[in-house]
Image (cartoon, rainbow, N blue to C red):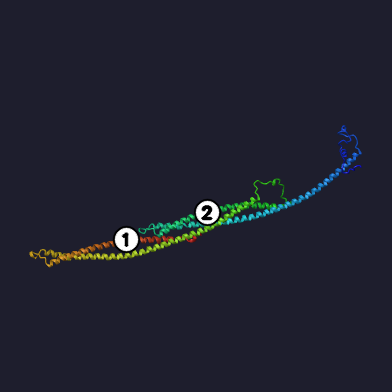
Amino acid sequence: MAQTVPPCELSPREYDVACNTGAYTSSGLATAGFRTAKYLMDEWFQNCYARYHQAFADRDGSERQRHESQQLAAETAALAQRTQQDSTRRVGERLQDMHCWQSELQRQVGQLVADTDLLLAQKQRLERALDATAVPFSIAMDNLQCRERRQHPDLVRDHVEVELLKEAELIRNIQQLLKRTIMQAVNQIRLNRQHKETCEMDWSDKVEAYNIDETCARYHNQSTQVQFHPHSTKFEESASTTETWARFTQDNLLRAEREHLASVNLRTLIDAILRDTSEDLRLQCDAVNLAFARRCEELEDVLHKLQFHLRKTLREITDQEHQVAVLKQAIKDKEAPLRVAQTRLYQRSYRPNVELCRDTAQFRLLSEVEELNMSLAALREKLQEAEQALRNLEETRLGLEKDIAIKTNSLFIDRQKCMAHRARYPSVLQLAGY
């Protein structure tokens, strides 16, 4: 039974005839390159069949390709739309992230600015407090110098001088503490400004990136600003990753927060230092003033006693001078009886012969002269004692007057000079830098 060839398929022989190749061609090797004979009917039909087959195959391939193209175009359009929507959503999420970081950075920048302003105010307080300590120090040193002009024996290291030395040492220590604290404030202000600039640079970069991404988020297929950039898909070598990007801002925020806490602690420390130093200075000032008051009371008490003793001594000098005059007059009064008695004895020594008798009168005259000499000796001794007592009183008077002058000078220095000068001592508010 003969095999039926489908119209869309050709046998190898028919294919060779249609293509004019192989062993079934109408010309041999001698006629290669040109043809002189006519085609056969089989060849004609085969040629038609070949054309049919070729047209059918081309249509079928074209239809398949068209269907695939339409399907591919629809798929790529949907994919491009989904991809664009996803990219737009991702850009929107990125905008939200950047907005959050911008807000945090802006908050930290404002916080650092506020901390810096507060520290500047605290620094001014420290400087004013340091300037205010110059007055107490000059007062203390002036008091010490004034008290060096006291005279002996009042030039003593008393409780006032001890308190004044303590006050001067306290002021020097406070001045050094305030200077160190000012340097700490200056360093903290510098760190705040550095981290503020870092946060501002990060914030500025994020604002610029936000504006760029916001512009990108508004682009669509009908935008007139879009164009081809073939090399834009290449990553920059300096580009950061999402982790490094977030860590960079987090580190900036952590450093800013750390400086904020350091500023808060430093302000608290400055407040405590100014409060404690001002209170310490006022307490020491009160201690010095109390010591001055007690010393002045002691000086006044001693001065009153010295003046009392001086008045007594002056009265005693007057009485003693009168007594010396009385003794001198008594001695002088004894000279006349002594002359009389001695003259009597002298005249009676000229009695003749046996009349030169040691009679009762002679013995009485001798005892009178002896008594008068003893009286004169006793009076002269008393006179010497009185004169010595008078000299002692005069020396005591001079000593009392000198001591009164010294005490008056000391009291004048402590009360009129030192305590009056201490009235200029700054108040607690001034010492606290207000």
Give the image location of residue 48, x and y in percent: 89, 41
Residue shown at the point (42%, 62%) measured from the top left = 290
Secondary structure under tag 1 reads helix
> Could you tell which of marks 1 and 2 lies nearer the N-terminus?
2
CB contact under 8 Å: marks 1 and 2: no
Say which quadrant the N terminus sits in.
Answer: top right
Residue of label 2: 184
Residue of label 1: 399
Above or below, 317 against 96 in this view is: below
Q: Say which quarter of the image contains residue 379.
A: bottom left
* Residue 325 seen in the current view: yes
Residue shown at the point (43%, 58%) measured from the top left = 166
Give the image location of residue 363, x and y in percent: 13, 66
Disc 1 marks a residue whose amino acid type is Gly
Give the image location of residue 394, x and y in percent: 29, 62
Q: Which residue of the protein is positioned furthest toward the bottom in this rendering?
A: 360
Q: How far is disc 1 from disc 2 in space, using C-alphas?
A: 60 Å
- Please state if 423 lies on the left or on the right of 13 as rendered: left
Q: Which mark is residue 128?
A: none
Disc 2 marks a residue whose amino acid type is Gln
Secondary structure under tag 2 reads helix
Residue shown at the point (62%, 55%) measured from the top left = 104
* Residue 424 seen in the current view: no
Circle 1 residues within 10 Å: few <14, some 14–19, many ≥20: some
Q: Nearer the viewer, residue 277 or 193?
A: 277
Circle 2 residues within 10 Å: few <14, some 14–19, many ≥20: some
Q: Say which quarter of the image contains residue 139.
A: bottom left
